[in-house]
Structure formats: structure tokens, C-alpha cells
């Protein structure tokens, strides 16, 4: 670093900037909920459910306590449990496989496509057994999985499909929004998601009235009416405070999503101008897809990935690895008997990807600082572009 002045800080995420822009709206609704002293479910939650269902163009939305629960609830409603198998991606946040495991079913992994990082539909059929009940495709980083072939396979084998749309609210696949592309979908409103609450929150969407009713009942201990329990659910109620915050934020979501897409295209232009395309693989939006860029994830040679992270950090640029250990190699799933090499594309992605700062409030100066720092790093490294080709396999 030859710079005299302190480099411009570009944190990986800056939620304060978003709050500043909507502070008055948020503070007003939070005060209203506090005045009402109505904190659990109730009118704020049902209004949010109506608005969020409309937003996703789904028939039903059921608010719940987290994105993790939003995966568990439809699995339970579909009766999935001991002895069943559920197919999913090994390259996701832990909750995807964790939810399957918690029902008593076995997660069965299918490797990803190297460019979209989503489950590869061409490899799903080979993993289907007589025990298979469901498929959970993950719309990773904000771009939907290839849902048409996945739904075709599911229909052919009588399987249900649950979208893990935790990172993908507002994304679309051939004109249809995430949340309407399977039997049910799970959304997370964890603060760093595109629609983030002030704490944990989640939502299930579905067009199936019976499934939706069952999910709504399971989130209140299987209770309907009060103190009559049809099945054993658990407490996954959504708080009114979260719903009130999310209702305000939902009105801004499309503008923020456009902001994220603008940041993504500026990154792409800047990196190309710096000649970085030989060293890094940029994220791509598939034809027919609308990518909402929860994350902007690039791929670099595994040998330099951690050095690049350190170099960015020295220059006050935040970054993250989503995710460093694929799910099939997690300690808690050792009994599944997987080994390194079982899902080579997921393993390569875990070693080669790096998420750069991504939020609509990033300024041009911040984006330039990121691309210049990246260019300095690769100029100092003398990496052969071939390295990447070999590593990507
Ligand atoms: C965030 C996330 C979840 C879990 O959501 P929580 O609200 O944190 O429980 C599940 N799947 C994916 C892909 C996620 O990114």
C-alpha cells in the first residue's frame, strides 16, 4: 500500500445507511406497536402476510420466527420424517440441511452447477430412491435455481418441492417470482437479507390452501381453536414489531433491489475495465432470470482467495465467504459418510468464492476503491489465468 491517506472504508454490509434513509417511517410504526402493546401475531402480522403474499404473487403467506423455521414448517406439514429422504444442495447455509435433519429425514445432496452455484437438475434423478419425498432447491445469492426441470422431475416421481428462497425475495424465473415456483417456499428476514427485520423473522409462501393452513397451525403448536391441539407443532410465531418494520421496508424493496442490480452492473463494468476478467469469474444472470443480488460473489483461484481477502481487509474493504465448508463435510453430518471429492463442484466453490460488499447504498467512490484494490492485488500476484481454469474443473 503506497497510499498516504487512509483508504475509504467499504464494509461488507452497512445496515445503518438503510435505517437512516427510512428512520422516520420506521420509528413511527415501532412507536404504534409499542402503544398498542399487541406484540405477537395480530393485525400487523396478518397485514404483512397479505402484503408479502401479494408481493411474491403467492396465494398465501404465513409469517414465522425465522427462515430456518420457514423450511422446517412445510417439511412437517408435508409429513416428512423418519425414513424419508430429501434432496438438496450441499452448497448453502446450514439451515437448509438442518431443517431436513430435524424432521428425522435424511438430507441427500446433489452437486451444483459451477456457474449459478445452484443445484444441478441434470444430477437430481440419479439421487432419487423409493424413500425420496421432496426436493429443496436453494436460490443462492439471489438467483433462482432452474425450476422448470426440477419441477418436471418432481412431478414425474411424485415429489414435493420446497424453495429455499431465503436469499431471493423478489427474484423471478421466466416471469414467475420466487415463492410461487414450488409447493411452498421459505423466506428469511434475517437482518442481512434483502428484506431484513430488526431481529429474526421468516415466512412461508404457498399456493396450496391445505398446506398453508397446516403451516399456520404448526407455528402455534398445532393449535386450533385455542387450546385444542391437532398435532404437535412448536412456537414459531412472528412478532408484531418485526411485521411492522417489514411492512415499511417492503414498500422500498423494489427500489433497493434495483439499487443492488445497479451496483452489480457497475462492479462488472469496473472489473472489466481493469482487465480482471482473466483472473476472476463474475456472477452471471441467467437468461429469463431476475437476480436480486443478496450477494455479489466472484470466483478466484483457490490459491489466492484468502490472500485476496486479507489484502481487501488491509484496504478497509469487507468481504465474506459463503460458505467455506460444504454441508456434506460438516462434522454433524459425519454419519452420512461423505468424503472430500463427493461433490467436487460444491467443494471447489467453497474454496474459490468470495462475496464482495453488496448493498444499494454503495457509492461510486466505494466501488472504484474496490475495483482498484482488486486490480492492485492481481497486478502484484502474477497469477496465470490458467490457474483458474484448472481449479474450476
Ligand atoms: C439465511 C438463510 C436461511 C435461514 O434463515 P434464518 O432466518 O437465519 O433462520 C436458510 N437458507 C438460506 C439459503 C439462507 O441464506
Image (spheres, grey):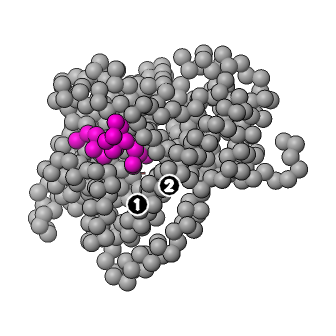
Residue 123, placed above or below residue 155: above
114 and 95: which is toward the camera: 114
Residue at point 27%, 72% (across, down): 43
Q: Position of residue 227 (x, y in %)?
A: 13, 68
Q: Which residue is mark 2?
A: 256
In the image, is residue 1 part of the stretch drawn in magenta?
Answer: no
349 horizontally vs 203: left or right: right
What's the magenta region? 167-183
Residue at point 21%, 57% (across, down): 216
Q: Secondary structure at mark 1?
A: helix
Asked if disc 1 is less than 8 Å from ligand 1, the answer is no
Residue 81, placed above or below residue 249: above
Q: In which quadrant is the C terminus drawn?
A: top right
Q: In which quadrant is the N terminus drawn?
A: top right
Cα distance between the residues tagged 2 and 1: 10 Å
Residue at point 46%, 45% (across, down): 292
Q: Which residue is mark 1?
A: 250
- Secondary structure mostly seen in magenta is loop
29 horizontally vs 322: left or right: left
Amino acid at each position: 500500500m503506497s497510499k498516504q491517506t487512509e483508504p475509504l472504508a467499504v464494509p461488507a454490509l452497512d445496515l445503518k445507511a438503510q435505517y437512516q434513509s427510512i428512520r422516520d417511517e420506521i420509528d413511527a410504526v415501532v412507536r404504534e406497536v409499542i402503544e398498542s402493546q399487541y406484540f405477537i401475531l395480530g393485525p400487523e402480522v396478518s397485514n404483512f402476510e397479505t402484503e408479502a403474499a401479494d408481493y411474491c404473487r403467492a396465494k398465501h403467506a404465513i409469517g414465522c420466527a425465522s427462515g430456518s423455521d420457514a423450511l422446517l414448517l412445510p417439511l412437517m406439514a408435508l409429513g416428512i420424517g423418519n425414513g424419508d429422504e430429501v434432496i438438496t444442495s450441499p452448497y448453502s447455509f446450514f439451515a437448509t440441511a438442518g431443517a431436513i435433519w430435524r424432521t428425522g429425514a435424511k438430507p441427500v445432496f446433489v452437486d451444483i452447477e459451477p456457474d449459478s452455484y445452484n443445484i444441478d437438475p441434470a444430477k437430481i434423478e440419479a439421487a432419487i430412491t423409493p424413500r425420496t419425498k421432496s426436493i429443496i432447491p436453494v436460490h443462492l445469492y439471489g438467483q433462482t435455481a432452474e425450476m422448470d426441470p426440477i419441477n418436471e422431475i418432481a412431478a414425474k416421481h411424485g415429489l414435493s418441492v420446497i424453495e429455499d428462497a431465503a436469499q431471493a425475495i423478489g427474484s423471478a424465473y421466466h416471469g414467475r417470482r420466487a415463492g410461487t415456483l414450488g409447493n411452498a417456499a421459505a423466506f428469511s428476514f434475517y437482518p442481512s437479507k434483502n428484506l431484513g427485520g430488526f431481529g429474526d423473522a421468516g415466512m412461508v409462501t404457498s399456493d396450496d390452501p391445505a398446506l398453508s393452513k397446516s403451516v399456520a397451525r404448526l407455528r402455534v403448536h398445532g393449535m386450533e381453536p385455542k387450546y385444542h391441539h391437532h398435532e404437535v407443532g412448536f412456537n414459531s410465531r412472528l412478532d408484531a414489531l418485526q411485521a411492522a418494520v417489514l411492512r415499511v421496508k417492503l414498500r422500498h424493496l423494489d427500489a433497493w433491489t434495483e439499487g443492488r442490480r445497479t451496483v452489480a452492473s457497475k462492479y462488472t463494468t469496473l472489473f472489466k475495465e481493469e482487465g480482471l476478467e482473466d483472473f476472476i469469474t463474475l456472477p452471471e444472470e441467467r437468461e429469463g432470470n431476475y437476480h436480486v443480488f443478496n450477494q455479489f460473489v466472484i470466483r478466484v483461484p483457490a490459491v489466492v482467495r484468502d490472500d485476496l481477502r486479507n489484502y481487501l481487509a488491509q484496504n478497509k474493504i469487507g468481504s465474506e465467504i459463503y460458505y467455506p465448508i460444504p454441508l456434506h463435510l460438516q462434522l454433524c453430518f459425519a454419519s452420512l459418510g461423505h468424503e472430500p471429492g463427493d461433490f467436487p463442484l460444491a467443494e471447489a466453490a467453497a474454496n474459490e468464492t468470495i462475496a464482495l460488499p453488496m448493498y444499494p447504498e454503495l457509492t461510486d467512490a466505494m466501488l472504484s476503491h474496490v475495483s482498484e484494490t482488486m486490480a492492485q492485488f492481481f497486478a502484484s500476484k502474477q497469477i496465470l489465468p490458467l490457474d483458474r481454469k484448472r481449479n474450476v474443473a
